[in-house]
Image: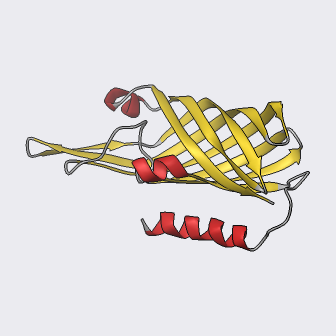
């Protein structure tokens, strides 16, 4: 919870520090997956570096990452972190918003602990994944926000045995462009 409040405070400080008009050619963007922070308690923060108006390279850190939307209760606990690297293509829109598609690589590390019938099972979540993300990004006075969805394929047999080879994810990003 402290991490999510810190990320939200950072975004707020940056936004209060600038009351200029929207950038014509942004160089970077920081963002937070607002929806998953509220629903899952998973803090997903990212940075995107634009090297062309319609292309960028992104990196994200997912703290308390979950496999898809599996919940956590008293007998199940995810202790995982992920790093995601993406190449983003923006198209079909204008300066106020665009559709984007992003192929990505993700590496999750940590473990999943489950206790059932007085037996504790630990699953290593160390796994690489390859996937595709798509969404829409609105831009308003240097703020960028919008929904996205993604699908990826896990490459760890241990993760596939416990969960699934395919993982679905979605969210709503809120960010600031500079």
For the residue pair 112 and 168, the one nearer the viewer reads as 168
Q: How many marks?
A: 0
Question: Is residue 80 in view?
Answer: no
Q: Is residue 17 left or right of residue 110?
A: right
Q: Is residue 8 above or below residue 87?
A: below
Q: Is residue 175 above or below residue 156?
A: below
Q: Is residue 95 left or right of residue 85?
A: right
For the point 47% across and 30% down, the residue is 167
Q: Is residue 41 left or right of residue 84?
A: left
For the point 66% across and 73% down, the residue is 13
Residue 129 percent across, percent down from the top left: 55, 34
Quadrant of the rendered image containing residue 105:
top right
Residue 136 percent across, percent down from the top left: 69, 35
For the point 45% across and 32% down, the residue is 156
Quadrant where the C terminus lies?
A: bottom right
Q: Is residue 23 above or below residue 100?
A: below
Quadrant where the N terminus lies?
A: bottom left
Residue farthest left in this picture: 117
Residue 48 percent across, percent down from the top left: 74, 51
């Amino acid at each position: 919870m402290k991490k999510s409040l810190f990320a939200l405070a950072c975004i707020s400080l940056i936004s209060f520090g600038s009351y200029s008009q929207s950038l014509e050619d942004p160089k970077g963007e920081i963002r937070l997956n607002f929806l998953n922070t509220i629903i899952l308690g998973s803090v997903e923060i990212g940075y995107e570096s634009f090297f062309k108006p319609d292309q960028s390279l992104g990196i994200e850190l997912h703290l308390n990452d979950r496999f898809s939307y599996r919940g956590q209760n008293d007998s199940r606990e995810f202790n995982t972190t992920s790093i995601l690297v993406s190449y983003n293509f923006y198209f079909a829109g204008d300066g106020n918003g665009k559709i984007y598609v992003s192929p990505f690589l993700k590496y999750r590390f940590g473990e999943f602990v489950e206790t059932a019938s007085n037996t504790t099972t630990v699953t290593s979540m160390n796994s690489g994944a390859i996937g595709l993300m798509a969404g829409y990004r609105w831009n308003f006075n240097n703020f960028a926000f919008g929904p996205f969805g993604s699908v990826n394929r896990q490459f760890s047999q241990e993760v596939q045995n416990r969960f699934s080879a395919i993982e679905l994810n979605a969210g709503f990003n809120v960010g600031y462009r500079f």
